[in-house]
Image: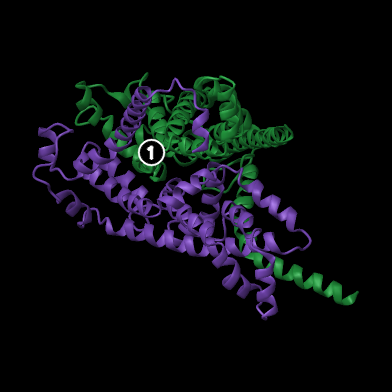
Chain colours: A green, B purple
Amino acid sequence: MKNARGRTFRRAAVGYGLLAPSMIGIGLFLIVPVLVAIAVSFDSWNIISPPKWLGPQNYISVLTDPDVWHSFLVTAQYTLLVIPTQTILGLGLAVLLSKRLPGTPVFRVIFALPWICAPLTLGIVWKWVFAPTGGLLNAIIGTRVEWLTDFSLALPAVSFVSVWTQTGYVALFYLAGLSGVPKDIQDAARVDGAGEIGVFWRITMPLLRPTTFFVLATSIISSFQVFDTVYAMTGGGPGAPGRTDVIAHRIYSLAFEQLDLGKASALSVILMIGLIVLTVLQQVYFRRRITYDVAN
Amino acid sequence: MATNQYRPLSRGPVRRIGSTVLIYAVLIFGAVIILTPFLLSFMTGLKSPVQFSNTSSLSLPSPITWANFQELFGPDHNFISPIAVTVQMTVVILVVQLGCSILAAYAFARLSFPGRDIIFWAYLATMMIPAVTTIVPLYGMFTAVGLRNTFWALVLPTLFGSPYAIFLLREYFRGVPDDLEAAARIDGCGTLRVLWYVVIPYSRPIIATLTVITVVSHWNNFLWPRVITSGPDWAVLTVATADLQSQYNGNWTLVMAATTLALLPLIVIYLIFQRQIVNSISIGGFK
């Protein structure tokens, strides 16, 4: 008995010894900051003087601020422009890549290239592409359009860059999903007289549902946090409130330009809760989906 | 290909050639869209400002000039420093973070002790925290202890292990055959030696993939370095490029030389390790 308890204790000591660095790191730099963010969201704080208790005032001022609602709207519009486009284009490219024609690996490498580059740096490159003078796009189509400072063009331009960056990633993800679709089911449908389009819609797409779901969920979650591309291309502008002033950019400017860290924290806590709800819903649905698919 | 015999006969050779041509046309069109901004921005970095304003953005640089790069590395901009800071930051984070993640993943995958599963779920839950939520409090914490604008500020938040890396490593470590580990234990190996001589060599593929993910994501990081550093001393490449752009708005030859410098090392790494990167994308890496 005594020996067994000693062994359990030793095993726990080794386990916690191995976990110690990551527990310190994750505790101090992820969990404590979240608690601090929640605490500060009830304070008035400008970094220079110490935080002062304010109560729920920051939340009231965030939720009644038309500029904050504008940022939510902009983020939603950005998401609606980016996600359907990149998902459809990515799926299309994946189907073409899955034919395994000679040269496919080269195309795969090219399509994923923007994904590994810094969004900030790519944003600056695209700022040049869209520049009114000396810019690449105007040189190609022979115009002098002010893409990024035009109120109706700025958000589509930023969204286009996100689609350009992420479509290859979506395609590779779908390609992995497609390789998991059993060929014999598709062939059985062909024997039964189904055309290629019928096979795709009735066999392949339903089997890709977990992939589609994962791609949609993760890209919606990340599109609600988009920052670098916007910062580099438009700085949230044009106009006031800015046409591309997404939520993450609003939090940044509340905190580090207007030095209203309490209000910035309140908005960041609201964003976090929204994203956690989204992630949990995704997990619950995803789990049900998988058991359903396996059961069938 | 046994499956070919089931193909409907209507797919004649003419139709197949037609569809092959169409597929290549679409793929090549996509590749051109992806590559054009890269290639033409590199070319712009090789033009003199006069050449740039007198010729089309589509024209080749003639003559090629390295003046922009010389200016970047000159005393005004000193781009050596952001490159050195970025490399130093990336290497330190890579080594320490990977080490700490391996220790934690081993504990989660192959030891059983009270509290293990709760801690693991807590780690997973932290993956839901958006970066913008921790930026403000981390800024306050680092300022309070006087670490703002130091090397430590750049590396500390992600130094001691990443929940995502721990999760991926744990999945892989669970597949290490029990016999291998038992044999090493019988030979008298302690936990750390088992890790070093058995688990790590066995898990080389996932460690290679994670190495690439870690290097890429820290090389590209912007928001945290932007917030916590100021001035040229600890500016990383992304921050230095952003500052250069806002300071020299319109001086595109200089700015495109800087983006070329920032992008090329990663593109080289990408071409060398493309297999790991493509793998990591299919397991949902690079969030």
Q: Nearer the viewer, residue A164 or B69?
A: A164
Up-down relation of residue A9 to residue B258 (above or below): below
**Amino acid tagged 1:** Phe
Q: Give left or right: position of A206 versus B234.
A: right
Up-down relation of residue B191 to residue A101 (above or below): below
Q: Mark 1 lies on which chain?
A: A
Q: Tell me, yes or no, if residue A258 can be seen here.
A: no
Image coordinates of residue A293 in percent, x first then y, are: 69, 33
Q: Which residue is drawn at 39% across and 45% down?
A: A118
Q: Give left or right: position of A282 versus B115.
A: left
Image coordinates of residue B252 in percent, x first then y, are: 22, 39
Up-down relation of residue A210 to residue B218 (above or below): above
Q: Give left or right: position of B204 versus B242.
A: right
In the image as oriented, which residue stretches furthest toward the right? A1
- Crowdedness near tag 1: few (<14), some (14–19) or many (≥20) residues, C-alpha within 10 Å: many
Residue corresponding to mark 1 = A111
